[in-house]
Amino acid sequence: MDTRPSRQTRQKEAVLRSLVDSGRSLAPAEILELARAEVPTLNLSTVYRQLRTLHEEAQVVRVDLPGQAARFEAPCSHAPVRGHAHHHHHFHCTACDRVFPIHGCPGGIERLAPAGFRVEQHELTLRGRCADCAGAAA
């Protein structure tokens, strides 16, 4: 009896649950570490496969920060329709390298563009120390 579909489902669910439970953007290696609590035999190549499938199914969102490898996050609960990314920004901790969502936007970005230009999208990344790292440094 082939148990592959069941295992794939368990792996997929473990990857997705890791993202949802974390509440932040995770690198594939971080997802692997968390998901192994449910599926100890999980490996990094399987995490990448599951992320690709989940991304194609709009169950995860890819987060690209300049100079960083891709991270992934669960669709934001602020999104009006599941699978559609809610517009938000990110905070990247320069000490621990974690990335957190920021549910807000300063707006008015269009006024920064040169005359005659039309802004169609924008991304904002704040960098500094997260609460854990800032507290540890104090």
Image (cartoon, grey):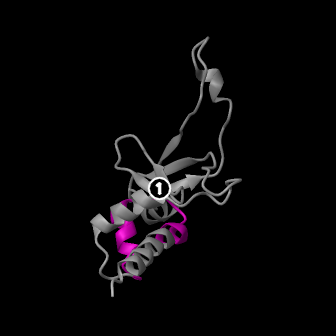
Q: Please provide the residue range marked out in magenta.
A: 18-38
Q: Is residue 96 above or below residue 62?
A: below
Question: Which of the image's four quarters has the N terminus?
Answer: bottom left
Q: Which residue is mark 1?
A: 55
Spot the residue most to the front.
Answer: 1
Crowd around label 1: few <14 · some 14–19 · many ≥20 (10 Å): some
Q: Is residue 60 magenta?
A: no
Compared to residue 25, the image places residue 110 above or below, namely above
Quarter occupied by residue 52 = bottom left
**Relative to residue 10, is residue 44 depicted above or below?**
above
The secondary structure making up most of the magenta span is: helix
Q: Residue at x 47, y 54 (%)?
A: 56
Q: Position of residue 74 (x, y in %)?
A: 54, 61
Q: What residue is at 66 percent from the left and 38 percent from the top? A: 106
Which of these two is toward me, 18 or 95?
A: 18
Q: Amino acid at mark 1?
A: His
SS at circle 1: helix
